[in-house]
Amino acid sequence: MSKPLLRGSPNLIETLSKLRTKALRKRIWFVTLTDQERILTGLIIKHIKIVKNGVLATVIARIMGKLVHAIKNSFMNMIEQLGRSIAVAMATGAYACGNKEALSWTENLNYIRYLGLMAYHDPSRRILIAQYGACK
């Protein structure tokens, strides 16, 4: 499986560069990587055209893995944070309207993620829910 990686792939460097840009934009570049990893990544992007060394490919893969993991987790954390506040507002409103099981909605992670994802794509939804509650 590692043969294509060892033959040399300019796409690996391009992918590392794109991940670096994403991580910088999401402000996780300095949090996720150590000083050595950041310096090494900068040097790799600037000076290496094709990766031919297996050890270098392994190091790049580890750095890329760290960045991908951090980028995915930052998005999920943001979605859950948005969804949790909306779930609390909706559960409180539904409980006030007489739904006794509504308070358990705040513990349902799938429901929280759904609400967060909907609010992420439609910010007016979270504003309306925050202002007016679930059943007002």
Image (tube, grey):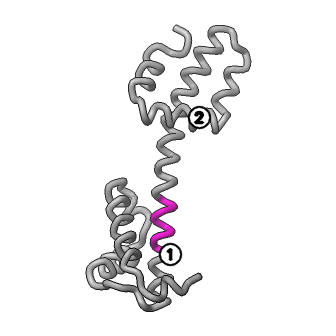
In the displayed structure image, the side of residue 97 where residue 73 appears, left or right:
left
Single out the residue that lies furthest toward the right. 101
Marks 1/2: CA–CA distance: 31 Å
Q: Residue at x 32, y 62 (%)?
A: 21
* Residue 118 in picture, x, y percent from top left: 49, 32
Q: Give the camera-side residue of 100 and 18.
A: 18
* Residue 26 in picture, x, y percent from top left: 36, 53
Q: Residue at x 46, y 70 (%)?
A: 64
* Residue 22 in picture, x, y percent from top left: 36, 59
Magenta segment, principal secondary structure? helix
Q: Where the N terminus falls, by quadrant?
A: bottom right
Q: Which residue is mark 2?
A: 112
Please give the label number shown on residue 62. 1
Q: Residues within 10 Å of mark 1 (few under 14, many from 20)?
A: few
Question: Magenta segment, which residues?
Answer: 62-70
Q: Is residue 7 above or below residue 82?
A: below
* Residue 32 in picture, x, y percent from top left: 44, 64
The kind of residue tagged 1 is Arg
Using the rendered view, name the quadrant where residue 9 is placed: bottom left
The kind of residue tagged 2 is Ile
Instruction: Confirm whether the magenta stretch covers residue 10.
Output: no
In the displayed structure image, the side of residue 12 where residue 2 appears, left or right:
right
